[in-house]
Image (cartoon, rainbow, N blue to C red):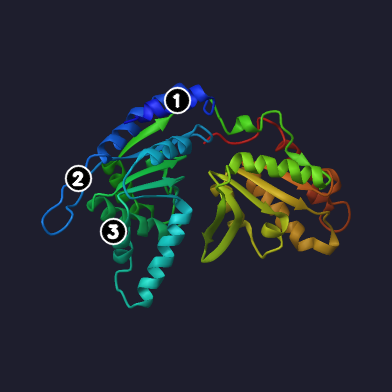
């Protein structure tokens, strides 16, 4: 049977991957999981026995280092019932299932969700684990405890070391047992690489397109297709009980229009959560701003401030150059800072590393 290392090297030889010593350094952990999961589960006379625990993996490191690619490589080679999901999308599914359980009068709504997962899968792969909500923080600990007890193997990627999950969150001390559980049940490995493979897609490339025309739309579409690999799906963020939707999302890259994010009654908390969830945002169809769309303009300023402070990489299309977007009406003077930030965010070196 082909090993993970052999599959990785074959992809390098085929030119679909670039060799990276840091990536090669964690292949042993992936191969251990593949090999252990390939062993058959013993059956009893009455039912299938609980699978022998296979320790999972928590793979963390900077943006664009290839964490998701490595997890997908393992996922493609694991031949047991499995499921892969972005962590945000998974938690949305959990909340929906818990809602249905409560509607049936179930007291402990987490239990039937765990039971359903245990019946369906033996291997769970999560992309970009991050906890930003106290409700999720409390749910995820109990859910994962049940999954681990049933022999479900979890592999997840994250941009944060486990000790930084839900950092500075409300009542974080209640979340600390889950961090201890992760360290116990998952092998924690850091992917340390000087190469940001995602940033390479933008190196030397134009990031701000004005005016919005067919050429701009075509170029942005090509950039998005390169990032999303045809596997994008909507991402719904929970912010203080509200839903904030990014229409297109894959592997830390979001795509939305100006109207998706600025024509709706969103505020600073929504944009801060968005900036935490994405590392690259493709924002399309920014119009000219002024008296006629003053509220939308204010939201746009708040959005750019949030993206700027979080060092999110921005690719956008707009009706005009930054300095000419907002030329009349209240707020013109204040918009000068936003225009300056839009210029700064076009630099090829812009973007955070965590």
Q: Mark 2 points at which residue?
A: 52
In depth, the one of 177 and 81 nearer the eye is: 81
Query: How far from the left and from the top, in percent, is residue 180?
Result: 29, 45
**Element at label 3:** helix
Q: Mark 1 points at which residue?
A: 10
**Element at label 1:** helix
Kindly indicate the quadrant of the structure image that contains residue 314: top right
Kindly indicate the quadrant of the structure image that contains residue 135: bottom left
Front of the two marks 1 and 3? 1
Q: Do the residues labelled 1 and 3 touch (CB within 8 Å)?
A: no
In depth, the one of 47 and 135 nearer the eye is: 47
Residue depicted at x 61% and y 29%: 200
**Res 132 visible:** no
**Element at label 2:** loop
Which of disc 3 and disc 2 is earlier in sequence? 2
Residue depicted at x 33% and y 28%: 28
């Amino acid at each position: 049977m082909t090993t993970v290392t052999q599959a990785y090297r074959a992809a390098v030889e085929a030119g679909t991957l670039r060799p990276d010593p840091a990536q090669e350094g964690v292949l042993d952990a992936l191969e251990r999981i593949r090999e252990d999961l390939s062993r058959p589960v013993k059956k009893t006379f009455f039912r299938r026995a609980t699978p022998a625990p296979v320790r999972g993996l928590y793979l963390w490191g900077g943006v664009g280092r290839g964490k998701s690619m490595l997890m997908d490589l393992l996922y493609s080679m694991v031949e047991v019932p499995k499921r892969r999901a972005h962590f945000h999308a998974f938690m949305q599914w959990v909340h929906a299932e818990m809602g249905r359980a409560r509607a049936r009068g179930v007291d402990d709504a987490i239990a039937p969700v765990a039971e359903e997962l245990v019946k369906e899968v033996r291997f769970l792969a999560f992309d970009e684990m991050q906890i930003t909500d106290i409700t999720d923080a409390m749910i995820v600990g109990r859910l994962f405890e049940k999954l681990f007890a049933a022999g479900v193997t979890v592999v997840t990627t994250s941009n944060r070391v486990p000790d930084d999950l839900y950092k500075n969150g409300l009542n974080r001390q209640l979340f600390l047992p889950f961090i201890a559980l992760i360290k116990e049940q998952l092998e924690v490995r850091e992917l340390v690489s000087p190469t940001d493979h995602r940033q390479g897609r933008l190196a030397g490339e134009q990031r701000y397109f004005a005016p919005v025309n067919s050429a701009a739309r075509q170029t942005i579409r090509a950039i998005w297709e390169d990032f999303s690999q045809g596997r994008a799906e909507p991402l719904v963020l929970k912010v203080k009980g509200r839903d904030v939707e990014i229409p297109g999302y894959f592997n830390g890259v979001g795509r939305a229009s100006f109207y998706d994010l600025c024509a709706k009654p969103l505020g600073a908390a929504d944009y801060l959560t968005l900036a935490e969830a994405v590392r690259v945002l493709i924002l399309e169809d920014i119009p000219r701003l002024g008296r006629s769309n003053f509220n939308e303009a204010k939201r746009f300023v708040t959005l750019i401030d949030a993206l700027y402070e979080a060092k999110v990489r921005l690719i956008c299309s707009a009706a005009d150059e930054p300095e000419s977007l907002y030329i009349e009406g209240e707020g013109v003077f204040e918009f000068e800072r936003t225009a300056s930030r839009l210029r700064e965010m076009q630099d090829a070196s812009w973007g955070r590393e965590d």
